Image (cartoon, rainbow, N blue to C red):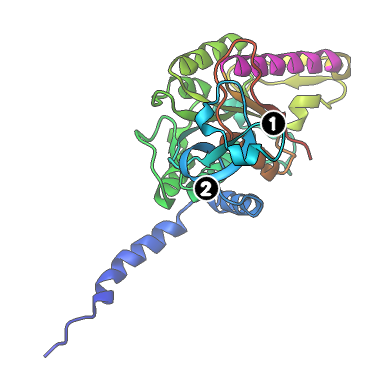
Amino acid sequence: MTEPAPPRAAALPRLDRAEATAALLPPLLVAAERIASSVALGIHGRRRAGPGEDFWEFRRHQPGDSPSRIDWRRSARADPLFVREHEWEAAQAIWIACDRSPSMAYASRRSLPWKAARAMELALALASLLVRGGERIALAGHDTLPAQGRAALVRMALALSLESNAHGPEAAWSAPIARHGRMVILGDFLDPIEDLRAGLRRLAGAGVRGHLVQILDPAEETLPFEGRMRFDGLEGEPPVLVDRVEAVRTRYQRRLAAHRDQIAALARRHGWGFLAHHTDQPPRLALLALYRALSETPPRRTPGTSGPTARTSG
């Protein structure tokens, strides 16, 4: 008489399929999780003020705070009044968008990653950190609803690895995002400022708050070339022949800086944050700055109020 197989044997084919699926995951996810792990070492959980039940810390009383929140025992020790902050416990929903238009397929040196590769790496590393903190994530334009856990992270990695899922910046502006949701958009943002203004206005009008992460190759920032050069457009623009690059370098740098300032001002006006990153910089610096910004209370859209703006540095 044949003995029945132990319960574990029936699960082996399923485990084999899971291991096979894991082997097919893009190496980008492995690299992204390594970056996320290095940043996670310096982050001790999510500490965000909000309507949770667990006590977090004291802060000084501000105009508009309810008198019922004043901790009179703590305030008696010093002149200022103090209120109690509580840990924000509800899981956030964060949509992440990556610009994968042709202009992102650029690297000035073989030792540098393409801008698109760095954008996807940062997107997955951020998603990994958020999942570890219990947040819900979604790839804008692909997932209907944000989800928690490693399954959501793997689904995002697989979606980003498919060339058929490559989208330009316009996809981020038109992606269906829940009202009052939060969003992170990674791209070079070299589009006309009018297009950026229209897209950000649409999202902010729906109550969506978030952060723009501009990713540039260092050569795009400094224009280090010399002599006669022909520049070919990556998105169908006609080639431009420049007799002496050094003669136009300063003007180019000024125009790029002015464009970035416009983007940052536009982001602030709508209550969004802005972060600039170069592909020759360690990705963990941008990831840490971005994660810290997301951990803060999102700024309200108020005329004349400055939102977070930052630049990573080596």
128 sits left or right of 118 in the view = left
- Mark 2 Cα-neighbour bin, 10 Å: few <14, some 14–19, many ≥20: many
* Residue 152 screen position, x and y as percent: 41, 46
Q: Which residues are magenta?
A: 249-270
The residue positioned 56% from the left and 33% from the top of the image is 70
| 114, above or below 148, in the image | above
- Mark 1 Cα-neighbour bin, 10 Å: few <14, some 14–19, many ≥20: few
The residue positioned 52% from the left and 40% from the top of the image is 86
Q: Which mark is residue 80?
A: 1
Looking at the rendered structure, the kind of residue marked 1 is Pro
* Residue 253 screen position, x and y as percent: 80, 18
User: Element type at marker 2?
Assistant: helix
**Residue, far bottom:** 1
Question: Could you tell me which quadrant the N terminus lies in?
Answer: bottom left
Q: Is residue 297 magenta?
A: no
The residue positioned 34% from the left and 66% from the top of the image is 15
User: Element type at marker 1?
Assistant: loop
| 134, above or below 221, in the image | below
Residue 42 visible in the current orientation: yes
Q: Is residue 262 magenta?
A: yes
* Residue 256 screen position, x and y as percent: 74, 17
Q: Which residue is mark 2?
A: 128
Residue 117 visible in the current orientation: no
| 202, above or below 137, in the image | above
